[in-house]
Image (cartoon, helix red, strand yellow):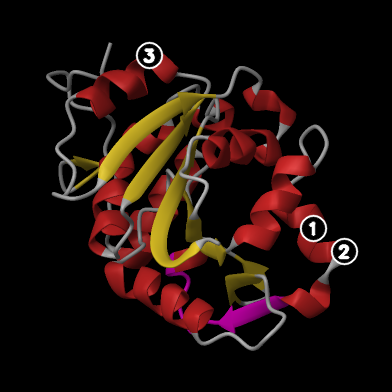
Amino acid sequence: MPQVNAVAAVVMAAGAGRRMGGLPKSLLERDGEPLLLRQIRLLGDAGAGTVVVVLGHHAPRLQALLAQAAPRPGVGLRWVLNPAPDEGPGSSLRCGLAALPPDVGTLLVALGDQPLLELPDLQAMLAAWRARPAGVELVLPQHAGQPGHPIVFGAVLRQAVMQARAGQGVREWRRAHPAQVQVVPLAHGRCTTDVDTPEDLQRLGERFGVWLRPPRPADPAAP
């Protein structure tokens, strides 16, 4: 049986960043910290005992950063390569789930480019999962009608994603099983905000006062 109190996490960081001019978005820095390392830190603080980062496009640059990361004590950090990252998020998620221990009862999935996410957001999603009604297999945040991340699920949905075809994954499953999905309404957009374009970076700074910067030249992940 899965260890229901054990928590593991997958960080999705396989994208090409084409709309950002080919820049790996998870290397953007907030207050001098790459977003990818910030996500790993928050997940560890939230209780994830294992964090798996899924790489794809830009894998060498991100791997160089991860190789020098100092995760929270007690947190196992690993990364895997999706050889076909353009097949869709389901493909990347399967790569991440396959690298996790089989007996983990609680799975968190976050994106590598969520600049506003804070520890209380992760804790709130985990609390909602633990207090979920019987029959609920997926908990996800929502703001202004938009679903976000992190999402939380367990063994049932994990198995369904692993058995799905091609790029299909959580999105297709939740549309087919609405009665097994619990939506957590949020009054803020921290869980639904990521960055895809340079215009997104400008709006982020103007609206929230959070200005992301490209990797510094001294950063080992920079070219």
Residue designated by label 1: 173
Image quarter where the C terminus lies is: top left
- Magenta span includes 115: no
Residue at 29 percent across and 63 percent down: it is: 47
Where disc 3 sits, the SS reads helix
Give the vertical position of 63 relative to 49 (above or below).
above
* Few, some or many residues within 10 Å of mark 3 (<14, 14–19, 20+): few
Residue sitting nearer the eye, 157 or 119: 157
* Distance from the alpha carbon under mark 3 to that under mark 1: 32 Å
Residue type, numbered disc 3: Pro
Residue 115 position in % (x across, y down): 36, 54
Q: Are marks 2 and 1 in contact (CB under 8 Å)?
A: yes
Residue sitting nearer the eye, 10 or 219: 10
Residue designated by label 3: 60
Task: Choose the circle earlier in sequence order: 2 or 3.
Answer: 3
Residue designated by label 2: 176
* Few, some or many residues within 10 Å of mark 1 (<14, 14–19, 20+): some
Residue at 33 percent across and 40 percent down: it is: 36
Give the vertical position of 136 relative to 170 (above or below).
below
Residue type, numbered disc 1: Trp
